Image: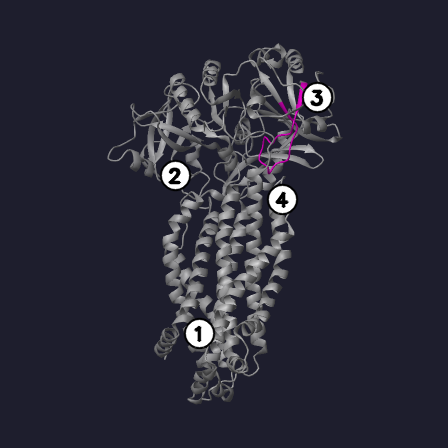
Amino acid sequence: MIRNYFKTAWRTLTRNRAYSLITILGLTIGLSAFMLVSTVVMDDLSYDRQWSRGERIFRLVSVDKMGAGLYNKNESSYTGMLTHLKTEFPEVETGARISSSDLRLKLNATDESGISSSFIRADSTIWEMLDLEILAGTPGTLVQGTRNLVITESYRDKYFRGEDPVGKTVYDVPSFTSESTPYLITGVIRDLPANSIFRADMLLVTKPSAETLSAGGFRGFSRNYVLVKPGTDVEALTRKVNSRAKDFDRGRYVTEYEFQPLKAVYLHSDFAAGQSVKGDIKNVWIFTGVAVLLLLIACGNFVNLSSARAVYRLKETGVRKILGADKSRIILQFLTESFLFFAIASVGALIIYTVGLPRLEHFVEHPLTLTLFSGFRRVAAALLFIVLLSMLTGIYPALIISGFKTSNALKGNTGRAGNQNRVRRTLVVGQFAVSIVVLISLMVVQMQVRYLNNKDLGFDKENLLSIDFTAWEGKGEAFKNELLRQTGIESVSIANWIPSRGAGSMSRKIQDPQNPDKTIQVNYINGDTDLGKTLGLKLERGRFLGNTLSYDKLNTDQVMEMDSAQSMNAYLNQSTLVTAFGAKAIGISDLEVPDRRVPTRPVGIVKDFHNESLKNPLQPTFIAAESSSDYGGMLIRVEPGHTQQAAEAVQTLLKQFYPGKYLEMNWVDDLLAKQYRTESRLLSLFSFFSGLSMFLAALGIFGLVTQALAQRVKEIGIRKVLGAPVHAIVRLFSVDFLKLVVMATVLASPVAWWLMNRWLADFAYRITIPWGVFALAGGIAVTVALLTISFQTIKSALANPVKALRTE
């Protein structure tokens, strides 16, 4: 019996090739898109859940309480806190400092540029926390007097093919000093999982810090992770730690601590600016919603197209009933057809999925650990899901077809189909509503990204070259002067800040003059006196910093040797530039007057400029000049039209002044664009989703039009005989269906407005969604629907009316 059902289903599929092709195409696209997007979601949710002790590993997060509900959360905490936790709290089993960075390694003496490598710097106690499989060497035992490097299996296979790297010494390409640092390879481990924040090519294993929370002296910061003992009440431990932490707090603000679960670090760390591997739970929800909606649209299309085909199969159904087939057998027959459609579409979807997976990994910029092919259970679950989906999707068309009365079916009369039409029209409205929401989202994201890239930042980001932070080794000024002699270079500045690298060289909290119960953050940017000129800042009042006035430049080396009273006096006499926002927020009106609140001597007010991402609001910012800086980055202003020539000249001089040193160069506009990489990816995804959803929605209305034309074929014939032109028939059918699209636009617009305003809320500077976006999205949807409708109606209107009116 089942075999017969499949034979009949296959004959039906091959007999109606056009219908079958459209149905399978819609399902294939919907299923493949769902699979690909679900893989990203599945991988994001799997981060750091593979460690056997993962449930007991927490990151120590510091929270500075500043009163009036204000706080500042940071992924780092005092290094001494780790020692304190391990010695004072029995609930803590062990802990380690773990951070990620990049390194350029020279594997042989002749290599000048080195190999860019990512590494995890960790205390040796990491072996007690993570399940790291050792393949060679004894990396668990620290070799004193050198830096211990443990490389991964893939790194070994790529760069040490055919040889044993354990015991070899490699050297870095220095970026700060001119001296290379040796690293001893002490072992090889299995590759670190790609779905982990500890994703890297190697480990740099160090001795645990013995730093304590002493009352005085320097306190370092690090990213601290702790392993608590089984059964520990983490909430109770948090209360105990914060109760004791007050004894060590020596700042103006209370610092409290949170224990962030390791499995939450990847997706729930919007506060962690220094975290290199980071996701966003909001994007997970966006991707999940889009994947489900695409699948629903594809399934809705199948329902619409299958229901439309029911009109053509009335007599077949009637004959089956006369021959003794009951309703359950007819339902089973059509469910078999549904399963066959889904099975063929699934094969096509899997092919697209397999081909698209490497491209998807390139898009997300890391391998995807969990895919549909990750183990038999996952494959079995996917197959079961497809079977259930085919049954659930096919049951409604099967009930419709099996529900016709035998007499009506033999006459080709659909009977009372009002409820069926309402369901199909509802599906079409829903499909277009989803498509319009995605289309509006695409437009809004595109407008916001364009706004971010084109907004006036208050400084000139074009033709501005940057050299990353380094130690200038006493040759910085000479290098700068030589650069100024090169053709095409207008100005050069050495500074402790470059655009996209935080808010400034340092920051501090001061009491808000407008509201004493609150505090405001003040940012300081240190550089030479050419910084304002090189950035292209605009002076509103006062003067720029100059080389002729001795107090315009602070000698930081001398300040470090002063006592607190002397250093305060030095800072009060230091000249600074202040942004217009900073002058207004702090209440600075008189220039050339020392201000103890800051503390500096503001000598000029410059136009506001955005020293941070546009996701962050403006903050008071002061620019101070140092008499000499042997550490920092460099900004180089290039004349328009000389970018290539100037970049080559900089590279040549770098090799002359700093041979064997690797200094990274970037154009500032590229650095700023990278700040919005997530938004750019979202734009690409919405472009892809928008095209898919609109195509699938068009297939849905195609099915509805097909059914309507089949039911009214004789009416069309009569109208043609009576002289109705083609365009009149097209208009007759188009109006009703276009009403559905307009209704979808009305329903989708407020939903899209709400969703995109929630998304835009993450940006301190954002666009206002114009009404034209909704009109344009509706217009595009109407155009797509009109083209789809016209294709079918014109074909029917041009048909010979004699065939339509012939009595069979």
The amino acid pointed to by label 1 is Leu
Above or below — where is 558 with respect to 25? above
- Label 4 – label 2 distance at C-alpha: 47 Å
From the image, give the main secondary structure of the stretch colored magenta: loop
Q: Residue 691, how many percent across, how many down?
A: 49, 56
- Label 3 – label 1 distance at C-alpha: 77 Å
Kindly identify which residue carries mark 2. 132
Label 3 crowd (10 A; few <14 / some 14-19 / many >=20): few
Q: Residue 123, how many percent across, how many down?
A: 44, 30
Kindly identify which residue carries mark 3. 597
Kindly identify which residue carries mark 4. 767
Q: Nearer the viewer, mark 4 or mark 2?
A: 4
Which element type, helix, strand or loop, lies under badge 4?
A: loop
First reached walking from the N terminus: tag 3 or tag 1: 1
Kindly identify which residue carries mark 1. 335
- Answer whether residue 172 is magenta in the image: no
